[in-house]
Amino acid sequence: MRLSDCHSFHDFRRMAKRRLPGPIFNYIDGGADDEVTYRRNTASFEACDLVPNVLRGVTDVDMSVTVMGQRLAMPVYCSPTALQRLFHHQGERAVAAAAGKFGTMFGVSSLGTVSLEEARRISSGPQVYQFYFHKDRGLNREMMARAKQAGIEVMMLTVDSITGGNRERDKRTGFAIPFRLTLGGMAQFAMKPAWGINYVTHERFRLPQLENHIAMDGGALSISRYFTEMLDPGMTWDDVAEMVRDWGGQFCLKGVMSVEDAKRAVAIGCTGIVLSNHGGRQLDGSRSAFDQLAEIVDAVGDRIDVIMDGGVQRGTHVLKALALGAKAVGLGRYYLFPLAAAGQPGVERALELMRIEIERDMKLMGCTKIDQLTRDSLRFTRG
């Protein structure tokens, strides 16, 4: 299968599945428990229909948006995700370069495999730093200071991961960092020798944001120990309010799902919230971000930028979220599978397909600007 044969999310997923060893593919592809929420994230868009207008003169389409003070050439961005160099040796470098080429925002994770500083040098576009709240308050302040020094525009604190989700696919294969594979998992690696050759012939796997703050085991960080020992499950709104004040700029909470929490984010001075259930990887059975979007926009949308992610596979999904009031939409697996399949050219092709879809779908909706998408553009097929 060639990259030119990929025309949709599903094509990239198939190509990635052919290239990746099973444990790594399932790490990207899997969710928590029975994966109900993972499936619901995409299915929720199907319960909403678009109502197009015609004869509106749609020769020139402007799909740019401004979110948290950042100008994006299109209303999607590459959400921060962990461990990208496991999927392809280019990792965050590929994503930063592709996002810069398409004039959109991208994010680097605390568990990223390329440093904030290097990613900043690759792309001049808006960059998010996605980080976690540590028991060591000095470490939190140090990480924010480093981000500011690196020129990060938006701090994004993940608030739905005070403990890891129950990802049973990973348990079955033994996927962990460092690798502790089951016999079945090792067999799946043996079946994909090209990935292994690629992995060992490039630079050592690192987690540059964290390597000075936690002991390393055999050259690789124990991710499970990071979550259980370093993150603070006692984090409160007062703790976050202090971080917002210390940062003094664009500050976003990722993982907000209730109106009450959205209002509290406004009250402590956040400038953005991402409605997200972590791609269905944390609390199985939770609502989809799309299903929560309207009520949260109605409650706080005039005071804070509301963003969403989860399950987005098509340009029409993006338009539906924008019509409900989202300022932008985050992409995760949508770019991770093409990254795994083909590196930077894969991410670029995925973003180009999304750009083409959004432009075409806006024309078919009779819209030339994003703000012309409204609730009148939608009908829900269920309550």
Image: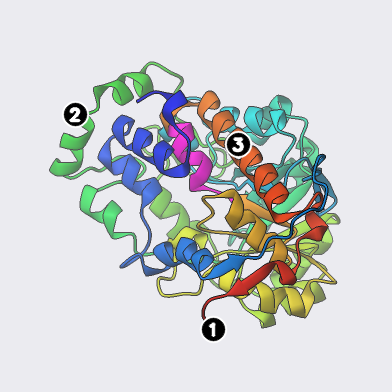
Q: Which residue type carries mark 1?
A: Gly
Residue at image location 76% in from the left, 80% down from the top: 299
Q: Which residue type carries mark 2?
A: Ala
Name the residue carrying label 3: 351
State whether residue 129 is above or below residue 192.
Answer: below
x and y percentages locating residue 102 in the rendered image = 70, 33
Q: Which mark is residue 383?
A: 1
The quadrant of the picture occupied by the N terminus is top left
SS at mark 2?
helix
Please report whichever mark, 2 or 1, sits nearer to the chain's N-terminal start: 2
Residue density around tag 1, few if under 14, some if 14–19, many if 20 or more, within 10 Å: few
Does the magenta portion include 337? Answer: yes
Name the residue carrying label 2: 190
Q: Nearer the viewer, mark 3 or mark 1?
A: 1
Residue lying at the far front in this picture: please name it: 55
Residue at image location 40% in from the left, 63% down from the top: 39
